[in-house]
Image (spheres, grey):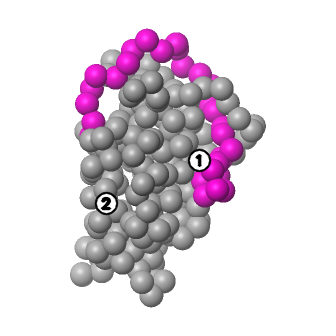
């Protein structure tokens, strides 16, 4: 029962912490939606499928966020410095709590998250990046290397993340993550 609770908690923490984070004062002066964008990843931690590069700074901000999040989770919550430049302070505070949870429970991820597609749209609360990503290769394990998530945990997720300008740079401001066979 205790391992099951840990598995459920580890699965839901990103979803619960990201939902409703940040503020709703997103910039609305952005052009209409762009087709899916793909960007080469930093340090090879996050893989994207498709053409190499996209000139859309809004979607690129999402990719930078995914890479930074992967680094934090792969380090067991020890590396958080790379998170601050890619997200709002409110989201950084929430993700820092997740990093603390990883450190406390001695958890870390293995492998890499693979972004299948990402695109931006305009919504009533600002600019939203919708993205599908796969976590098949990014397992959450304990200090002994044993998976802490049930085998039935979904591996495809749909992110709906607000992106806003902060000091002249596009950053992720939170949103929601749901299991989805996208």
Secondary structure, mark 2, is helix
Residue 20's x, y, as percent?
A: 25, 39
Which label was assigned to residue 160? none
Is the N terminus in the top left, top right, bottom left or bottom right quadrant? bottom left
Q: Nearer the viewer, residue 157 or 92?
A: 92
Is the C terminus in the top left, top right, bottom left or bottom right quadrant? top right
Which residues are the magenta region?
Answer: 21-48
Does 167 sit above or below residue 133?
above
Task: Look at the image and tell me whether residue 7 can be seen.
Answer: no
**Residue density around tag 2, few if under 14, some if 14–19, many if 20 or more, within 10 Å:** many
Residue contact at pointers 2 and 1, CB within 8 angstroms: no
Residue 155's x, y, as percent?
A: 50, 59
Answer left or right for 47 relative to 124.
right
Does 152 sit above or below residue 26?
below
- Residue at horizontal 43%, vertical 62%? 79
Residue 43 belongs to magenta span: yes
Which label was assigned to residue 115? 1
Residue 172's x, y, as percent?
A: 41, 37
- Residue at horizontal 60%, vertical 26%? 56
What type of secondary structure mainly makes up the magenta span? loop
Q: Which residue is mark 2?
A: 98
- Residue at horizontal 33%, vertical 18%? 124
- Residue at horizontal 65%, vertical 26%? 55
Answer left or right for 138 relative to 76.
right
**Residue density around tag 1, few if under 14, some if 14–19, many if 20 or more, within 10 Å:** many
């Amino acid at each position: 029962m205790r391992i099951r609770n840990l598995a459920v908690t580890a699965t839901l923490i990103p979803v619960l912490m990201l939902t409703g984070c940040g503020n709703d004062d997103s910039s609305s002066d952005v052009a209409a939606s762009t087709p899916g964008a793909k960007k080469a990843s930093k340090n090879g931690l996050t893989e994207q499928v498709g053409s190499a590069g996209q000139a859309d700074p809004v979607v690129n901000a999402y990719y930078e966020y995914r890479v930074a999040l992967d680094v934090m989770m792969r380090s067991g919550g020890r590396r958080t410095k790379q998170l601050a430049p890619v997200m709002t302070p409110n989201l950084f505070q929430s993700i820092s709590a997740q990093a603390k949870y990883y450190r406390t429970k001695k958890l870390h991820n293995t492998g890499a998250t693979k972004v299948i597609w990402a695109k931006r749209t305009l919504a009533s609360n600002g600019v939203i990046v919708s993205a599908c990503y796969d976590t098949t290769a990014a397992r959450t394990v304990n200090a002994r290397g044993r998976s802490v998530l049930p085998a039935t945990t979904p591996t495809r997720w749909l992110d709906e993340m607000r992106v806003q300008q902060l000091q002249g740079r596009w950053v992720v401001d939170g949103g929601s993550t749901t299991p989805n066979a996208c």
